[in-house]
Image (spheres, helix red, strand yellow):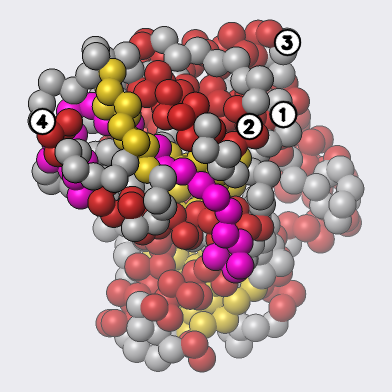
Amino acid sequence: MNNFSPAFAIVIPAYNEESTIHDITLRALTQSDLVIVVDDGSTDNTLEQLEGLPITLIAHSENQGKAASLWDGVQSARQHNVDYIVTLDGDGQHAPEDIPSLFSKSAQHPEHIIVGARLADKSAIPAKRYYANRIANFWISWAAGYPISDTQSGFRIYPAGLFDDLSISTAKHDSFVFESEIIILAAQKNIKCTSVAIPAVYAENARPSHFRGVRDITYITLMVGRSLIKRGMYLQGLYRSSIKPHLLAKANGKMDYDGYGTALLSLLIIFLTFGFTLLAMFVYVCYIALTARKESETGNVVMLGKRLQNNLPDYDYRLRLDRAVEVNRETPDQHYFILGGHTGDAEISEAEAGKRYLIDAGLEEKQIHCEENSRNTLENFRNLKAGHILDTRQISLITNRHHLARAGVMAGGFGFGVNLCAAEDQYKFGFINSISMLMESLLLHWYFAGKLYANITCNKRMLARIQ
C-alpha cells in the first residue's frame, strides 16, 4: 500500500446471509482487526454463523434496511477513531482481499471515496442489474457533477470525516438510496469518487439479490430528482458529467466552435427535412451493423480504442480486442494498430490499455503499434494518417457493429481503403443497442453536415480536420 497504512474498520451489513457470511467475515479479519457486522434482523442462521468470531456485532431485532445497517456500522466504527471506513456486502460479491488495491488508490487520493467498480466486467453481471446500474450512474453523475463508473457498488472506502454533520435518510424504503445519496452529498463537500476495477463475483450459493431494479432505481431517481430541483436542475452538473466528456471536447485548449456550429446545422437539416435525413443515416447504420463480416482481409488491422473504465477496457472495447486475438490466431504475424489517447480520468491511454490486453492474450509486442493522442473517432484517423505508421492505405477496421458505419465513413474520408470487421459475431437487438444505433446516426449526420458546410464555404481549417 505504498507505506500508506491508515487505521480503518470494515463494516459488513448482513441480511439472511447464512451461506456466505462466515467465510466473508473470516477473510475480512485477515485485513483488519476491527470488523463490524450488522445483522439486519435475519430470519435464517446468519447470527449462528457469526458465533465465536472476534468481531463487533450489531443485531437489529427487526429488518430496518441496508441504509440503517450501514449507518449503525459507520457510527460504531467512528467510536474507534479510525481514519477510514471500508464497507462491503455480506453476500460474497466483494472479496476482502481486494481491500489493499482500494487503499493503493486511496494513497493517491486520500480525500476521495474509493469505489470497487464492477461494470467493466459486463459479461459477469446479470443483464437487468447491469442496465439498472447504468441508468443510476447517469442520474447520480448528473447530480454529483462528474462521471462515475459504478454508483451502486457497496464495496467502498469512506474517509471517516465525511460523516461529520452528515444529514441523510436511513428509512427502510431508502435501503439502496443511501449509497447513491452519499455520493451526491460528498460531491457538495468537494469529495469525489475514484474507482478501482474489481471482478464482478456472483457466487452460486449466494441468496438472491435484495436489490429490486425497478423499485430501487425509482427511489434513487426520485432522490436525485429532489436534489436536482433544489439546485435549479444543476445543468452545470449535466454538462460536466455527460455532455463535456463525450461530445463537446475542447480542441487545443480552446472552445470547439466548429463543432458547436455544425451540430446546430445538423439539427437544422433534420428539422427542415422532417427527419428524413436522420432516418437515412439510421437505415445505413443498421444495414452495416447487420451485414458486416467478422473476417480481416488485410495485414494491417486497425482497432479503435474506447473510453476506459477504471483504467481497463470496458465490455465493448474487449470485444474489439478479442476479435483481434481471433484474427491473429487465424492469420499470425499481422500488425495491429490501436488508436486512442487519454480520455476521461484514465491514468493510461486507451491504446496502452488495449496493448496490454493483447500482450496478455498472447500477441507479441512487436506486432502492436499505438497512437496515443486522439480523443475521438475523427482524431483517430486524422492522427493515423498524419503519423505515417502504416505502409499502406488498405486497412481492416475492427470496432463494434453499431460503430462500424460511422468509423468506416470517417476512415474513407481520410483516404483509407477499409475492410469492415465486426467485433461481435452478430448484431443483438435490444433497447440499449437501439439507443446506440440512434446516437451513431446522429453523430454520422453531424459529420456529414460538417463536411457539407466545410466544402461549400471552402473552410480550410475544418477541411483539415476531416480529410
Gap between marks 4 and 3 measured at Cα: 48 Å
Q: Which residues are magenta?
A: 1-23
N-terminal of the pair, mark 4 or mark 3, is 4
User: Residue 132 at x, y = what percent?
Assistant: 37, 29
User: Residue 409 at x, y = what percent?
Assistant: 57, 55
Gap between marks 1 and 4 measured at Cα: 40 Å
Name the amino acid type tagged 2. Leu
Nearer to us of marks 1 and 4 is 4
Asked if the residue under mark 4 is in contact with the one under mark 1, i.e. CB atoms within 8 Å, the reply is no
Mark number displayed over residue 408: none
Name the amino acid type tagged 1. Lys
In the image, taking residue 211 as reference, residue 105 lies left or right, namely right
Nearer to us of marks 4 and 3 is 4
Magenta span contains residue 20: yes
Mark number displayed over residue 232: 3
Q: Residue at x 57, y 81 (%)?
A: 369
Q: Residue at x 30, y 32 (%)?
A: 57
Circle 4 — which element? Answer: loop
Mark number displayed over residue 162: 2
Gap between marks 1 and 2 measured at Cα: 8 Å
Quickly name the residue at label 4: 45
The answer to whether residue 434 of the structure is visible from this angle is no
N-terminal of the pair, mark 2 or mark 4, is 4
In front of the other: 86 or 369? 86
